[in-house]
């Protein structure tokens, strides 16, 4: 059923709300590979929906982080195929609602929407049901913001918050409207 | 001792980091007068340091919220005196470090720095020791941001996080560098 599909965001930000530096660097995120619920979240996801910027950042990784998942790259321009072992992507473009409907038709049930512009577009379009935001204890002053302009307030329902020894604070919200 | 003075921020923001709408409105903050530690914080403060924008917002309140505290309004322009009963302010201008030094000379021990631009200037100048940020579960898309540009990363140390029935999440950080 197309109506059963849902989309979540799972993202780390600086306390001032940046998911990456202006050049895409993630050096302010913790270096140690703590989990913070990421593995469990990924296990619940069948499809990644990412923008070109996130895709190009991931291409620089040593290994493909989305093994076993359908990965959809959103871009209005052609997308080069990944060369990392086991990696494969599909390329889609269009409005968030249409993207979600197409993925639902193909059996997707839980989308992981990632990347600044993509998250902002999907939020504005009302296509995100859940936000899991992990704040790293640093202010970086500039970068790629998690959130952007909206044509209306988006009310959230707080589900839970936990904090970690490293100082990370993770809050989960449902999108109410 | 001038070296004993410290400055804190205690502020509510939307999840997307705004402390007020572009017109100064605070309508997205909870209407019910929950405390969330504000009374205890205020009891620990002897001096308010606020910008013109915050001052003008407070002038619209029914009563003066800073009774019993020294209140310093920072502005490069003249500041009209408050007309609310019991209200009095001093007017200072200058660099954050000089403001803090002058207030320390006058016996101030714990400053409450408030207002978007003022908080940003004092953070950039290394004059804030503690941040208590309470996130309200809503995205408003635009407004007066809590944080601004920095010439360097500002590392924070997470002290504690609590959440409230209303969905507010409050985190306290110390400024490390």
Image (tube, coloured by chain):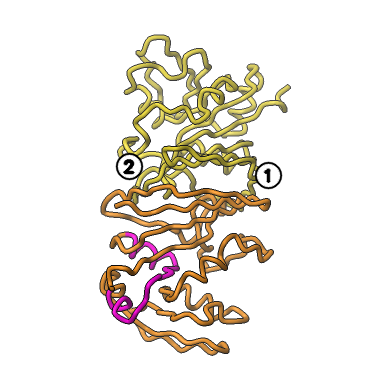
Chain colours: A yellow, B orange
The residue furthest top is: A86
Q: CA distance from mark 1 to mark 2?
A: 31 Å
Q: Position of residue A171 (x, y in %)?
A: 56, 41
| Above/below status of A84 relative to B131 | above
* Residue at x 39% of width, y 43% of height: A144
Q: Quick check: is B43 in the magenta stretch?
A: no
| Label 1 environment density (alpha carbons within 10 Å; few <14, some 14–19, many ≥20) | some
| Above/below status of B57 relative to A104 | below
Q: Quadrant of residue B6?
A: bottom left
Q: Quadrant of the image for the N terminus of chain A?
A: top right
Q: At numbered mark 2, what does the secondary structure look like: helix, strand or loop?
A: loop
The tag earlier along the polypeptide, 1 or 2, is 2
Q: At numbered mark 1, what does the secondary structure look like: helix, strand or loop?
A: loop
User: Do the residues marked 1 and 2 share a common chain?
Assistant: yes
Q: Position of residue B118 (x, y in %)?
A: 38, 68
**Residue A22, disc:** 2
Residue under pointer 1: A176
Q: Which residues are magenta?
A: B101-123
Q: Quick check: is B102 in the magenta stretch?
A: yes
């Amino acid at each position: 059923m197309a109506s059963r599909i849902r989309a979540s965001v799972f993202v780390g930000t600086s306390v001032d709300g940046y998911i990456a530096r202006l050049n895409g660097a993630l050096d302010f995120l913790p270096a140690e590979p703590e989990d913070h619920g990421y593995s469990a979240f990924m296990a619940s996801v069948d499809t990644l929906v990412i923008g070109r910027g996130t895709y190009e950042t991931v291409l620089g990784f040593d290994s493909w982080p989305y093994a076993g998942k359908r990965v959809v790259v959103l871009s209005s321009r052609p997308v080069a195929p990944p060369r990392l072992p086991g990696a494969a992507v599909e390329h889609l473009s269009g409005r968030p609602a249409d993207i979600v409907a197409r993925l639902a038709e193909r059996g997707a049930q839980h989308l992981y929407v990632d990347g600044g512009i993509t998250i902002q577009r999907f939020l504005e379009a009302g296509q995100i049901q859940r936000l899991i935001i992990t704040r790293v204890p640093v202010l970086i002053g500039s970068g790629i913001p998690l959130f952007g302009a909206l044509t209306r307030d988006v009310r959230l329902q707080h589900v839970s918050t936990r904090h970690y020894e490293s100082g990370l604070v993770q809050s989960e919200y449902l999108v109410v409207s």
